[in-house]
Amino acid sequence: MKILQIIPTLDRSGAEKQMTLLACGLAKEEFEVGVCALTRGGPYADDLRNAGIPLTVIGKRRKFSPAAYRRLKSAIRAFRPDIVHTWIFAANAYGRAAAAACGVPKIVCGERCVDPWKERWHLAVDRALAKKTDAIAVNSAGVRDFYAARGIPADLFEIIPNAAAPLPPSCITKEEIFRQLGVRLDGKRRLPYLIGLVARLWPQKRVRDAIWTAEQLKFTELDFHLVIIGDGPERENLLRYRDEIRIHDRVHFIGHRDDVYQFLPHFDLLWSTSGYEGLSNTVMEAMSAGVPVVASDIPGHRDLVVPGGTGVLIPEFYGEPIRRRTEFCRESFFLLRPEADETRRRMGAAAKERIATEFGLSRMLRRYAELYRRLHNQERRCV
């Protein structure tokens, strides 16, 4: 069975990672997989090439590009797929239209996140192309509910959660992390607590909330440091805010890292302050490393974090951001006290077990393979 995956880029982001895990993991004796990157390649291109998966970069440079659409159709005709599987809005739009125009027997669309940024025209495109779609693969019930409420037929959705691939072992110590941060330990009998936040620095992630929370947590006299891993358009504004409230000695921006796995096992807590998500890869990976999670109570997080079991969910307190940030501070303080060491260990162990049993890579691969087989055996959808 020939499966063509179409995605905007191969940047190191969540959907790109899941697509690469899927493309590289499907059984080669049953599936022949190809990948089209609509705009550009990226770091995951090497993983695909190492797995022997052919990659075509279409090179779309503008939002509306008839030339890129023609090149994409040519790539589809050359591969002759039984199923085209598209990921994220640009690829969902171009990819589904091109696949239908080329007469591809089955079309799968991948919606990965609750997307409140979409305007009426985006949603009109989604609804129109749903008529040409045989299944919409989503990673959480929250994503399904978001799109169903906006007019996408409920019978199209297939919930297949993200997978947390096994993490390589960390080759550094917690002491080494503090040295990298420039934190002097001065022979402390107990190392400071380490809080992690891994996110693209843009409004969805509400990293400003985390910096505010760290500033308040400082008044509790806990010995802690917040490590923010990631980059993005808000970096300079966030650095300026951190310095204005004089928390630069506790909040460390270390930029984009390809070795996040080195840090994860050494976090005492992971914070996820996002305003919306699909199913967070970062939260999953932290949990698989045995780290308790304090996260905003939003769809996606609810599918991962068991309140009181694997971490804490913070109510949104809509319209009252100070209350939300204060609750982040209060719950984090509770979990970072020395007397809460056993609670954190218990939560971390439960988090690791939950990811291993419910979000393993083999489970995701099996679910997608079952979806592809079922669609392949169905008659062509009538439009």
Image (tube, rainbow, N blue to C red):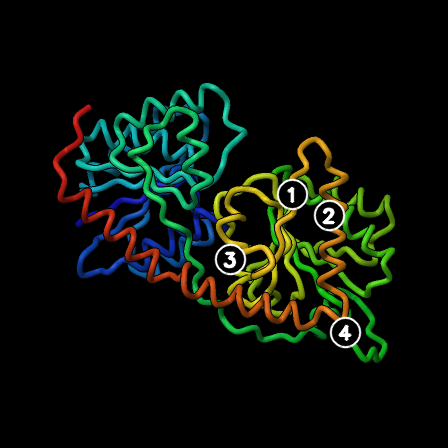
Q: Amino acid at mark 4?
A: Leu
Task: Classify residue 36 as left or right of residue 112.
Answer: left
Which label number is shown at residue 219?
A: none
| N-term mark: 3 or 1 | 3
Tell me the residue that label 2 is attached to.
327
Q: Are marks 1 and 4 in contact (CB under 8 Å)?
A: no
- Label 1: how many residues lie within 10 Å, few (<14), some (14-19) or many (20+)? some
Instruction: Examine the rendered structure and indicate whether residue 222 appears above or below residue 136.
Output: below
At which x and y percent is residue 98? 27, 30
Q: Residue at x 39, y 62 (%)?
A: 360
Task: Classify residue 301 as left or right of residue 4.
Answer: right
Which label number is shown at residue 191?
A: 4
| N-term mark: 2 or 3 | 3
CA distance for labels 3 and 1? 20 Å
Tell me the residue that label 1 is attached to.
315
Q: Amino acid at mark 3?
A: Met
Task: Classify residue 103 as left or right of residue 345.
Answer: left
Picture quadrant where residue 236 is located: top right
At which x and y percent is residue 258? 55, 59
| N-term mark: 2 or 1 | 1
- Label 4: how many residues lie within 10 Å, few (<14), some (14-19) or many (20+)? few
Instruction: Examine the rendered structure and indicate whether residue 150 appears above or below residue 339.
Output: above
CA distance for labels 4 and 2? 25 Å
At which x and y percent is residue 2? 19, 48
Q: Are marks 2 and 1 in contact (CB under 8 Å)?
A: yes
Q: Secondary structure at mark 1?
A: loop
Q: Amino acid at mark 2?
A: Glu
Labels in figure, total? 4
Q: Amino acid at mark 1?
A: Pro
